[in-house]
Image: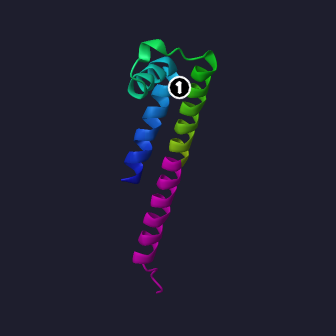
Amino acid sequence: MKALLLLAAGVVGLVESVAPRFVVRAWTRAAFRNSEDVEAREWVYAGARAEGAVFVAGALLGLYRLAVADESTTTDALDAAVEPDES
């Protein structure tokens, strides 16, 4: 479940990094009644792009940590199940 949430956050961040104007326009429509009257400044798009990059980096780091944790527990379980031959 955690991996799925991290993947979703990464995809949202990727979309926000690649198309910040689309994301800002969508959030503006959702937040304001008269979204046609609202005009975003240029730094808003740069901020949205930076936010998307942070989402992607956080998701990749989280997925990497999950993969490393799963790999180490799988290896430990296999090592504990196999007893060495002492003859």
Question: Residue at coordinates 40% horizontally, 22% vertically from top-left?
Answer: 29
Place of residue 40 in the rendered image (x, y in percent of width and height, measured from the top left): 55, 17
Place of residue 41 in the rendered image (x, y in percent of width and height, measured from the top left): 60, 16
Principal SS element in the magenta part? Answer: helix
Asked if residue 87 lies left or right of residue 50, the reply is left
Is residue 83 covered in magenta?
yes
User: How packed is label 1: few (under 14 Cα within 10 Å), some, or many (20 or more)?
Assistant: many
* Residue range highlighted in magenta: 62-87
Q: Nearer the viewer, residue 40 or 72?
A: 40
In the image, residue 52 sits, relative to residue 78, either above or below, namely: above
Tell me the amino acid under the disc marked 1: Ser
Q: How is the image coloured?
A: rainbow
**Residue bearing mark 1:** 17
Question: Residue at coordinates 40% horizontally, 40% vertically from top-left?
Answer: 8
Place of residue 51 in the rendered image (x, y in percent of width and height, measured from the top left): 57, 33
Circle 1: element type: helix
Q: Nearer the viewer, residue 81 or 63?
A: 63
